[in-house]
Amino acid sequence: MQNNATPQVKSVQFRALARPELVVVQVPINISDRVERPFRKPVTVKGLGEELYSELRNKEGNSVTLEIFDPSEIIRGVVESISYPVIQDVDKGSDTQYAVLTVRGTRQTILDDVTSIHVTGISAYGIMRYGA
């Protein structure tokens, strides 16, 4: 028996996937020799800024994951460039220098920690060994 019938399409589905949003992040990084800590006197460490800047230059072109805390975001990308040091307050004679780290990448979805506390009945036990 020969089947010469033309196939017919009964249904078609399309799935839309969100395109990754390309972002460029610029982060100022203190590369001065002066270490400032809250409620403490600033300390000067000779050669610290030069060491930090050279380490940042070595990261140029590498893949990185940035975790930004406020707003809460994770960005995965590549270190595009490290700017030359920028002096904070030239008029006041400030010794604080910053380098601007530029990362080009995509935003990642932030997933909550996986726990079994939200499973029906588990949180009612109140016993730690059941995954709460």
Image (cartoon, helix red, strand yellow):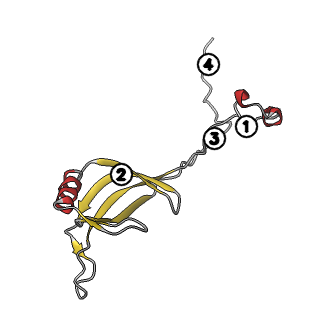
- Image disc number at residue 88: none
How far apart are the alpha carbons under marks 3 and 2? Answer: 36 Å
How far apart are the alpha carbons under marks 2 and 4? Answer: 54 Å
For the point 76% across and 31% down, which residue is it?
Answer: 127
Q: Nearer the viewer, mark 2 or mark 4?
A: 2
- Image disc number at residue 12: 3
Tell me the residue that label 1 is attached to. 117
Please identify the quadrant where the N terminus is shown. top right
Residue 126 is situated, as x and y percent measured from the top left of the image, at 79, 34
Under mark 3, the amino acid is: Val
Label 3 vs 1, first from the N-terminus: 3
Of residues 63 and 30, the one drawn nearer to the viewer in this rendering: 30
Q: Do labels 3 and 1 touch, CB within 8 Å?
A: no
Of residues 54 and 80, the one drawn nearer to the viewer in this rendering: 54
Give the quarter of the image for residue 26.
bottom left
How far apart are the alpha carbons under marks 3 and 4? Answer: 24 Å
Q: How many marks?
A: 4
Callout 1: SS: loop
- Image disc number at residue 3: 4
Give the quarter of the image for residue 23.
bottom left
Q: Residues within 10 Å of mark 2 (few under 14, many from 20)?
A: many
Callout 2: SS: strand
For the point 22% across and 67% down, which residue is it?
Answer: 83
Residue 2 is situated, as x and y percent measured from the top left of the image, at 60, 15
**Above or below 36: residue 2:** above
Label 2 vs 4, first from the N-terminus: 4
Tell me the residue that label 2 is attached to. 77
